[in-house]
Amino acid sequence: MKGNPFTGAAYLLRGFSLIRQPGIRQFVFVPLLINTLLFSLLIWFGAGQFDALITRLLPAALDWLEWLLWPLFAVTVSILVFFTFIHLSNLVGAPFNGLLAEAVESHLKGRSTADGASWGSVLKNLGPIFTAEIKKIVYFLTRGLPLLIFFAIPVINVVAPLLWMLFSAWMLALEYADYPMGNHDILFPEQRARLKKKGLLTFGFGSATLLLVMIPILNFIAMPTAVAGATVMWVEGFEGEEKKD
């Protein structure tokens, strides 16, 4: 695999800097709002339901077991985050994420963000955008759900967390790279092929994004930061090769 994983991780850091730039901030608000609302609802609902479940199932004499079960809840939430929150938030925010990627690319190339990004383009492309998101969800589910079985298989379950982390990093890189690549009419199968060519770069970016998603409070800004970072990765790491092909 080609590429530098540290360079990939650095793209995410640059994404955080870019979303605060004048001309780009206006395109960050909607993805940030969607991310914050959905994440807050997921944690609030999940914690409430788990607490009620523990109360019903555990007799009073076994209340001390509750502290052992909360770590299990944390792991469960992590899985739900990837198969519910991330895909749901990206499905809802997809049109705005594409717009943000367009604004970031215009900024990186020294153009006015108004030259490429326009709110009118969101309405015109809703159909293709949501179709692309559904295809990504199907791709991730058909590969992620079988991977969860490894957690229940003796011996293999020792390496299951590592496999899950690698898959999650790949999934996140693919998810967010779709926005700048999709703006250039690069379809999902071609996106995967291009990212695989620079696998270390891709996994570096995806791993950094995974870490950001797992940090409380900071995970609220994960979506716009990752979209901006993926756009930098596209412009500096992939677009030049596209022109050579």
Image: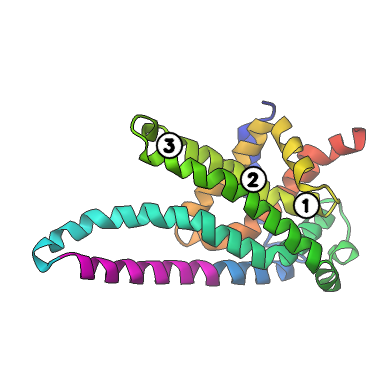
| Nearer-N-terminus badge (3/1) | 3
Q: Which residue is mark 2?
A: 173
Question: Who's the residue at 76% across and 47% down the image?
Answer: 188
Q: Is 67 displayed left or right of 10 in the figure?
A: left
- Asked if residue 91 shows in the view, the reply is yes
Label 3, label 1: how many angstroms apart (C-alpha)?
Answer: 31 Å
User: Distance between the Cα atoms at labels 2 and 3?
Assistant: 20 Å
Q: Residue at x 87, y 38 (%)?
A: 242
- The quarter of the rendered structure image containing the C terminus is top right
- Say which residue appears at 17% left-offset and 64% top-offset: 58
Give the CA distance from mark 2 to mark 1: 12 Å
**Front: mark 3 or 1:** 3
Which residue is at the front of the view, 217 or 2? 2
Q: Amino acid at mark 1?
A: Pro
Q: Nearer the viewer, residue 189 or 102?
A: 189
Q: Is residue 53 left or right of residue 3?
A: left
SS of the residue under disc 3: helix
| Label annotation for residue 82 | none
Q: Left of 107 or right of it: where is 150?
A: left
Q: Position of residue 237 (x, y in %)?
A: 76, 38
Badge 2 marks a residue whose secondary structure is helix
- Residue 180: give its label: 1
Task: Name the residue: 33% across, 33% down.
Answer: 154
